[in-house]
Amino acid sequence: MKIEIPRSEKLRLELGGPCWLKLRAIGLLLSLILLPGLAGCFKTDIKPYPSNWSPVVTIAAGQCPDISGEYQNSGDWDADSRSCGRKYPPKTAWNCDSSLAGNLVKMKAVEWSELSYSRNFMRVKLQQPDPDTLAVYIPSEGSPPKIFKRSKGDFDCDSSGLRFSTTGNALSLEGESTGQAIVRTTAGLLALSGAVVSTERVFRPLQDGSLSMEVTESVAMEMTMIFFLYGKNNAFVRWERYQPPPQNNINSGSP
């Protein structure tokens, strides 16, 4: 009797190649889960919520927070600058992106051109027509919204906020094709080394009407199947409500 093992919709390794390469990648992913229990093998840098920001709206257990509204696409972030500025940013990492559309659009498979395009708008609109749906609208001509479904595992909700989680190979970089990612990943696995990046984004409404995101990034690295490194850090980004620019009223003939 053949037993089918379901594939998780939340697991995005973005790997290709022979089965043994995938098994090594899965082993590396397991190290991301198990290594924190080994003393001396990991480093964490978890910062508290910024004390000078507006308080978070209280969310009932099991319910999704209401984050609908129109926001500035460019946000302010409170983070350690040393965690930014990667020369070769991994595809599934945060990469210090302070654009609201950019952080949401990449939660599904997306081409580099679309991701880069979404980061350049002034505003982005979020709608929640029902508790299961989040729609992201970018104000471009004829552009359909990006739809996320809780029932399909796109996001989850709890008392801490609306949560997106992604996991992928650190050798798969932003801006490169799938073929390039496979070649780079295969080379790392053949060298008996590699890394997995796991990123969690939690969106929370604030009492002043703005929107915050806490992003937590974990990295597990394996070298020659013996030496392991593990790191975990977080940061916060905030987006203000979008305010249309004031229109200049010109009264013809007035003194």
Image (tube, rainbow, N blue to C red):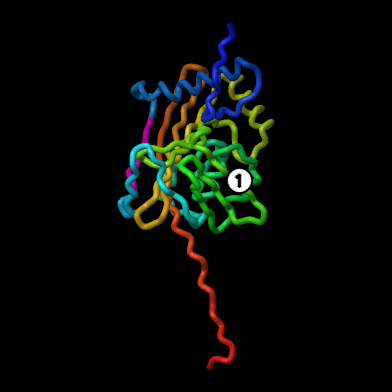
Residue 127 is a magenta residue: no
Chain part drawn in magenta: 43-49
Image location (x, y in percent) of residue 46? 35, 38
Quadrant for the N terminus, please: top right
Residue 9 in sight here: yes
Q: In the figure, is residue 52 to the left or right of 241?
A: left
Against 108, residue 207 (above or below) is below
In this view, the residue farthest toward the bottom is 255
Residue 48 is a magenta residue: yes
Residue occupying the point 51% across, 72% down: 246
Image location (x, y in percent) of residue 168? 54, 30
Against 6, residue 184 (above or below) is below
Element carrying mark 1: helix
Question: Based on the displayed image, in which of its 4 quarters is residue 31 positioned?
Answer: top left
Decide which of 153, 202 is in the foreground and name it.
153
Residue occupying the point 50% across, 34% down: 151
Residue 80 in sight here: no
In this view, the residue farthest toward the left is 51
Q: Amino acid at mark 1?
A: Leu
Residue occupying the point 42% across, 51% down: 211
Against 89, residue 249 (above or below) is below
Image location (x, y in percent) of residue 109? 60, 37
Residue occupying the point 54% across, 39% down: 107
Q: Which residue is denoted by mark 1 in the rendering?
A: 115
